[in-house]
Amino acid sequence: MALDKLSTGLSEHLEEMQALGIHKGKEHIITGVKPAESGNGRRYHIAGYADKEFLRMNSNSYLGLSFHPKVIAAEENAVRIFGTGPTAVRFISGTYQPHIRLENRLAQFHSREAGMIFSSAYSAVMGVLPSLISDATIVLSDSLNHNCIINSLRLARPAGKHIYKHLDLNDLERKLKECAGQCKRLLVVTDGIFSMRGDFAPLDKITAACAKYEDAFSEGIITIVDDSHGVGAFGQTGRGVEEYTKSRADILIATLGKALGVNGGYVVSDLKVIDYLRETAPFYIYSNPITPAEAEAALESINILDSQEGRELLEGLRRLTTYFETELVKLGYEIIKSEHPIIPVMIRNSQKTADLVHHLFTNGILVTGLNYPVVPKNNEEIRFQISADHTRQDIDYVLRVLEAFGAK
Ligand SMILES: Cc1ncc(COP(=O)(O)O)c(C=O)c1O
């Protein structure tokens, strides 16, 4: 009975979301994957669309590693040894050798003392931030930070929270100055790569600004970067925004579920910080880790990324990204240019965005349309994501379909 009454309220809320345009709607269900052939990359089948083939331009698997034979073999071998699930949380015999091997490898890859894995980057952020935010901590956060950062700050109880304008160093510095002497600990938290725009936090400049005010806080200024889209896709060797900006966060969080092609999240930092988080982060203590087989697969992905093959994949990814960007501009499309494989095509009109997403879908191309109010009015965009396993033929096909729409 109670659910009858509740469902009225839920329906109203859902209708409200629909009216506001923030309703995600029906999900496409992938029913099969067709291997690359005849110069085409992989194609996807979707429930309800018979044998139609779709080219995904909205996958986070920037290096195509989720189909890499060595990554698949690593997962298959481990699942036979350790079974399908961890069967307990870490401290209740849910810690397996692959978890430890992966944590050590991640720490080494990012030149840190220690690493710690979570079931996702979302839970890593939810676990790490509140644990480090005391009632004598103030937090400064970029206005376009990912939803997991926003929610982790809602879970925490800081002495103060200030949002600085997106990538605005003057605003950040003004706020650093205002907070000086107001608390013991200051946290500056930012995405590395921002997922909607493919732009990046100028970490070198952020850390330089923080250094100026460090003495005003008895427990220091701690920089925390979530570079989930950057690691494996940005920087000469795929070490993300830290590598690109030649700087370093105090605490780095990222995912195993995008460029690394597997699943899960992690944090790397000094040993003391990681020891503390293992004892205090509830999303780590009370929730299962990734499976041992996923850990082995992610370890294999890191090994590939950190090899000649990885550097070649990154090089190919950059080449395809630059080619797509250059040709889009020639076709008259406005883009936000960066070396990152997220390419936002700015449409700046809700109806046109919806029409173009539909046109692409009809032509077998999957993209992500971002309309108001998910993005501010006049910032409506279509997000394309390039992967190293796209072919030049795939990209040319997308360009032809875009050209045809432009001509209309
Ligand atoms: C900055 C950032 N953090 C975290 C996540 C979530 O990653 P995961 O799927 O591993 O939870 C995303 C994914 O969209 C992201 O862009």
Image (cartoon, grey):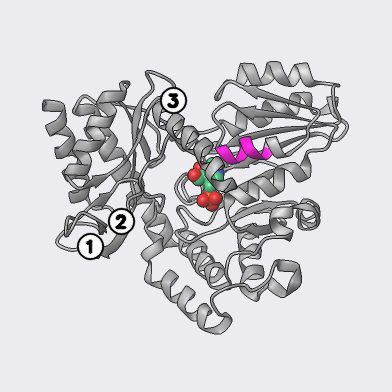
| Residue in the foreground of this view, choosing between 183 and 101 | 183
Task: Find the magenta span and give its range.
Answer: 147-152
CA separation, marks 2 and 1? Answer: 9 Å
Taking the magenta stretch, the answer to whether it contains residue 290 is no
Residue at figure coordinates x 37%, y 72% from the top left: 69
- Is the CB of mark 3 within 8 Å of ligand 1? no
The percent position of residue 400, horizontal first and vertical second, equals: 14, 39
Instruction: Report whether residue 228 is seen.
Output: no
| Residue in the foreground of this view, choosing between 116 and 370 | 370
The percent position of residue 408, horizontal first and vertical second, equals: 11, 26
Q: How many marks?
A: 3
Which residue lies under the disc numbered 1? 36
Q: Earlier in the sequence, mark 1 or mark 3?
A: 1
Q: Quadrant of residue 183?
A: top right
As drawn, the label of residue 389 is: 2
Residue at figure coordinates x 65%, y 21% from the top left: 172
In the image, is residue 345 above or below residue 311?
above
Residue at far front of view: 1
- With 388 as the anchor, is 299 left or right in this view? right
Which residue lies under the disc numbered 3? 373
Q: Quadrant of residue 308?
A: bottom left
- Is the CB of mark 1 within 8 Å of ligand 1? no
CA separation, marks 1 and 3? Answer: 37 Å
Q: Callout 1: helix, strand or loop?
A: loop
| Residue in the foreground of this view, choosing between 347 and 4 | 4
Tell me whether the residue at label 1 lies in contact with that at label 3, contact meaning CB atoms closer than 8 angstroms: no
Tell me whether the residue at label 2 lies in contact with that at label 1, contact meaning CB atoms closer than 8 angstroms: yes
